[in-house]
Amino acid sequence: MGRLGQDQATRPGADERGGRCGRGADPDDAAAATAAARDLLARAGGVLFDFDGPICRLFPGDSSLPVADELRELVTRCGCANLLTGRLRTDKDPHLVLRAVRRAAGPRPTADPHLRGLLGKLEERVAAGEVAAARVAWPTPDADALIRSLAGRRLRLAVVTNNSPRAADAYLREHGLRGHFHTVHGRTPDPDLMKPHPDVVHRALTSLRLRPQDAVMIGDTSADVEAAGRAGVPFIGYGRNELKRARLREAGATVVLGAYASLLDVAGERGAHDAAVHFAGEAARR
């Protein structure tokens, strides 16, 4: 599989990549969203990050199309081309093909060895494509700074993604961020447990030993909104352009940001507050 991402799409401009202010954004709405997000983070014990979008752009443009095409070719070679109906024949999202084969397997996918084997092969191909894409993924502006700031506050961080956990792990290691995350949770062999199912959120909460109300999830899709809601986790939406922000609001997200820059000092303020409290306590004991 060739290099994905950089070789398959033209790098976007600052506005498309989630620049510091979106064109047409209402400053009052942006200020209110920033204040709400800062309040959620100030009270949180941990943050759950979706991967593709909030941390990086794994498949910018149509760069996931070669992976989806590989899956369609494999499905066809296995004699299951009839499963590829409608948009499944052309869509760039390989996860749609995974879900279609899983649905065809019925409630007990292990009962059909042919489909079970096909699902395993598809998962291998998708994971390989995602790991390759992670090597050239575009960092989300200010995501690395936000991650380091939150980790500096000693918040427990986790990744909750529909992508392969190997891809997320590879990206975080490449960018020197893996040490800030307590755990990385991603897609399991059962595509039915992908978001909007809350399974990955529940797994992260268990790993971090957090109650839902003590965490915050940052995501960029309606599936993220639903998964967080079903798990009872407060949610911050990140949309790099107005269309994505509108879709998040339509899905029910009430706190939606177009950039992380306005959040970068929230960790410093909390850290300074904690240090002041610690100093006052030490002085009182003297």
Image (cartoon, rainbow, N blue to C red):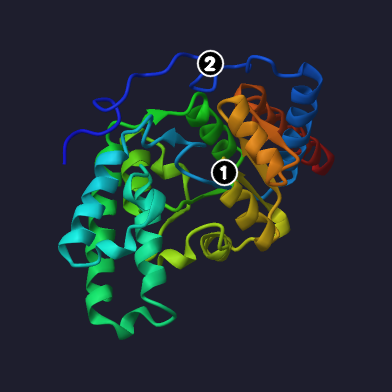
Res 253 quadrant in image:
top right
Res 106 quadrant in image:
bottom left
Q: Which residue is mark 1?
A: 221
Give the quadrant of the N terminus: top left
The amino acid type of the residue labelled 1 equals: Thr
Q: Which mark is residue 149?
A: none
Between 74 and 277, the one lying in front of the other is: 74
Rendered location of residue 170, percent (x, y): 31, 44
The residue at the point 32 percent across, 82 percent down is: 110
The reply to whether residue 250 is visible in this rendering is: yes
Circle 1 packing at 10 Å, graded few (<14), some (14-19), many (20+), is many
**Horizontal side of residue 226 vs 165, given as left or right:** right
**Horizontal side of residue 265 vs 187, given as left or right:** right
Q: CA distance from mark 1 to mark 2?
A: 19 Å
Rendered location of residue 117, percent (x, y): 22, 72
The residue at the point 45 percent across, 14 percent down is: 13
**Residue 193 to residue 195: above or below:** below
Rendered location of residue 22, percent (x, y): 63, 18
Circle 2 packing at 10 Å, graded few (<14), some (14-19), many (20+), is some
Helix, strand or loop at label 1? It is: loop
Rendered location of residue 281, percent (x, y): 79, 41
- In the picture as drawn, the residue positioned furthest to the right comes out as 284
Res 273 quadrant in image:
top right
**Horizontal side of residue 228 vs 72, given as left or right:** right
Between 267 and 128, the one lying in front of the other is: 128
Q: Which residue is mark 2?
A: 15
The amino acid type of the residue labelled 2 equals: Asp
**Residue 147 to residue 185: above or below:** above
Between 114 and 83, the one lying in front of the other is: 83
